[in-house]
Image (cartoon, coloured by chain):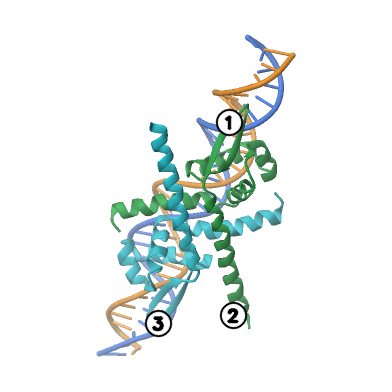
Chain colours: A green, B cyan, C orange, D blue
Amino acid sequence: MDDSTRRKYDSRARIIKAMGHGTRLFLVDELSRGERCVCDLQELVGADMSTVSKHLAVLREAGIVRDEKRGNQVFYSLRCPCVLNFFACVESVMQTSATQAVELAR
Amino acid sequence: MDDSTRRKYDSRARIIKAMGHGTRLFLVDELSRGERCVCDLQELVGADMSTVSKHLAVLREAGIVRDEKRGNQVFYSLRCPCVLNFFACVESVMQTSATQAVELAR
DNA sequence: CATCTATTTGGCTACATTGCCAAACAGCCA
DNA sequence: TGGCTGTTTGGCAATGTAGCCAAATAGATG
């Protein structure tokens, strides 16, 4: 694999990697229902505010969410809702695995 | 977020995380064109055979690819081609970022 | 059986990620 | 300005991941 090909796949992987964390997946799922401020998300996640903020930064840097400051709050929203398609595929992967596990057990 | 919710998102994230690496993304892309044996993939990737084998193991354990031993070769193929949908979304995220960067520059 | 090829596994080091705490920062309001 | 709330940043320890080499394994073949 040459350098430019590697760069191409690496930059794509960076975006997918941003989705590859339970908390961040949860955040995206929550944001699919509309914009939320960090404090609301923090409450839902139940982790330290700084932890949530850093997860949001990862999603923002990947281009998946957008932030907007209003007053002293920051509201996050999905910039590319297509990432929600990931969920359906993940379900299907899990379904296939589960089905296969049952078949092997028989 | 309660424990069972966390587990739910973590297990979903595990599958996405498996796609979150340049080399593994490349492998999936290559496998979308049909099954390949490890030695072919190794040549295409240009890394150590053991490295490629480990990446394939990550994809296999996530349920994304399947392996089949024939003779003394192992052939890998996509078990859930829906992961290819990731590519389109990633492109759209990158497109949005690029467009926005241009607009900000103006 | 001995050996060859294809693949996986173990082990190690280097590097990246996560999550908490503390500190800094930004906007609001008295 | 000073203090308050909401958010981000810096720093650190713990843990996880990547990639290489060497060794183990499995099937084919002489």
Secondary structure type for disc 2: helix
Up/down of B10 relative to C1, above or below: above
Inspect this view and state whether residue B19 appears.
Answer: yes
Tell which subunit mark 2 falls on: A
Looking at numbered disc 3 in the image, what kind of residue is underneath it? Arg
How far apart are the alpha carbons under marks 2 and 1? 53 Å
Disc 3 crowd rating (10 Å Cα; few below 14, some 14-19, many 20+) is: few
* 3 and 1 marks on the same chain: no
Query: Quick one: label 2 or label 1, which is nearer the N terminus?
Result: 1
User: What's the mark number on residue A69?
Assistant: 1
Left or right, D20 with respect to C16, comes to left
Q: Nearer the viewer, residue B72 or B12?
A: B12
The residue at 52%/53% (across/down) is A82
The residue at 45%/50% (across/down) is B92
Tag 2–tag 3 contact (CB < 8 Å): no
Res B67 quadrant in image: bottom left
Where residue A25 appears, as percent x and y from the top left, is 59, 51
Secondary structure type for disc 3: strand
Q: Name the residue tied to disc 2.
A: A104
* 2 and 3 marks on the same chain: no
Tell which subunit mark 3 falls on: B
Tell which subunit mark 1 falls on: A
Q: Name the residue tied to disc 3.
A: B70
Secondary structure type for disc 1: strand
